[in-house]
Amino acid sequence: MIKLTQHRQVILDLINESNHHWEAEELARTLAERDHPIGIATVYRGLAALEAQGLISSFQLADRKRYERASKAHHDHLICTECGTIEEFSNDRIEQQQDLVAKENGFSITGHQLVIFGVCRKCS
Amino acid sequence: MIKLTQHRQVILDLINESNHHWEAEELARTLAERDHPIGIATVYRGLAALEAQGLISSFQLADRKRYERASKAHHDHLICTECGTIEEFSNDRIEQQQDLVAKENGFSITGHQLVIFGVCRKCS
DNA sequence: TTCTATATGATAATGACTATCATTACTATT
DNA sequence: AATAGTAATGATAGTCATTATCATATAGAA
Ligand SMILES: [Mn+2]
Ligand SMILES: [Mn+2]
Ligand SMILES: [Zn+2]
Ligand SMILES: [Zn+2]
């Protein structure tokens, strides 16, 4: 059985108390600054365990994985290539069309990943 | 000036003569089998150079980059999680909605990546 | 308290990719 | 054809995110 240990609870709390999309190192650094240092391997394992339990969710952005609250409805991401800001959106038409595309190609769809890249208002 | 050398021409030809989505190691292996071995570093550099020239295009799938012909119209990808088959599709409605989403969020869109995961006909 | 299973953390290993650097291949000019 | 200058090549070392290893710590169950 996988345990929700003290360390994992602290990681979960940090993720739940914001809308941030955390990467592992960033999360470890933040916890260290808040006087709760956790070994980096433990952070990685904790994130994986929490995700396996469905308590947080993740997506792969370039070469790193980002973790966010699982308590949000399905959404996709808009990313500013200048400042790295990540915005969320959901669009039913796109979701519908994805199902249609899968059907047309004889795929039983299990998931998708959509990322829109652009320059945000602040940066343009 | 970047040169289209013999090696790079061979890499380009291999990519152009198929609809495959090549990863660097796979391409190097295939060239070696065809009695045209090219050092792996040269393959990586060649692929980057060819892409910079717009002669091939690429997208990131999980932890590796895939290269394909640039002579195809824009499309996105459907991937079978069982056998790894990659199918292509394009859907104008999705493209339109992406533009709309970007506009609604104040982003000037520069690109996107959409991958649909599922199980293909053969594998289901 | 003792047993047992899992977690932890320091560190090594992995794997895709990039950097280094000595050598080679092209290209343009004598 | 020989020379010089520039870019390419390939063996190999380095990078970086992530995972594996393993000795030790910890938390519940009995
Ligand atoms: Mn979606
Ligand atoms: Mn394609
Ligand atoms: Zn921005
Ligand atoms: Zn399949």
Image (cartoon, coloured by chain):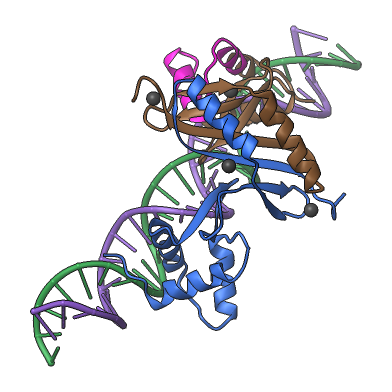
Chain colours: A blue, B brown, C green, D purple
* Residue B36 shows in the view: yes
B83 or A93: nearer the eye?
A: A93
Q: In the rendered image of this protein, does residue B93 appear above or below residue C13? A: above
Looking at the rendered image, the quarter that the C terminus of chain B falls into is top left
Quarter residue B14 falls in: top right
**Residue A10, percent from left and from top:** 48, 75
> Is B33 one of the magenta-colored residues?
yes
**Residue B7, percent from left and from top:** 60, 18
Quarter residue A97 falls in: top right
**Residue under the point 63% across and 63% down:** A19
**Residue under the point 56% across and 31% down:** A98
Left or right of residue B104: residue A34: left
Q: In the rendered image of this protein, does residue B63 appear above or below residue A3? A: above
**Residue B6, percent from left and from top:** 63, 14
Looking at the rendered image, the quarter that the N terminus of chain B falls into is top right
> Is B30 one of the magenta-colored residues?
yes
* Residue B38 shows in the view: no
- Total labels: the figure holds 0
Q: Quadrant of ligand 4?
A: top left
A96 or B46: nearer the eye?
A: A96
Left or right of residue A25: residue D23: left
Left or right of residue D26: residue B10: right
Q: In the rendered image of this protein, does residue C13 appear above or below residue B92? A: below
Left or right of residue D20: residue A27: right
**Residue D6, percent from left and from top:** 80, 29
C4 or B101: nearer the eye?
A: B101
Range of magenta residues: B11-37
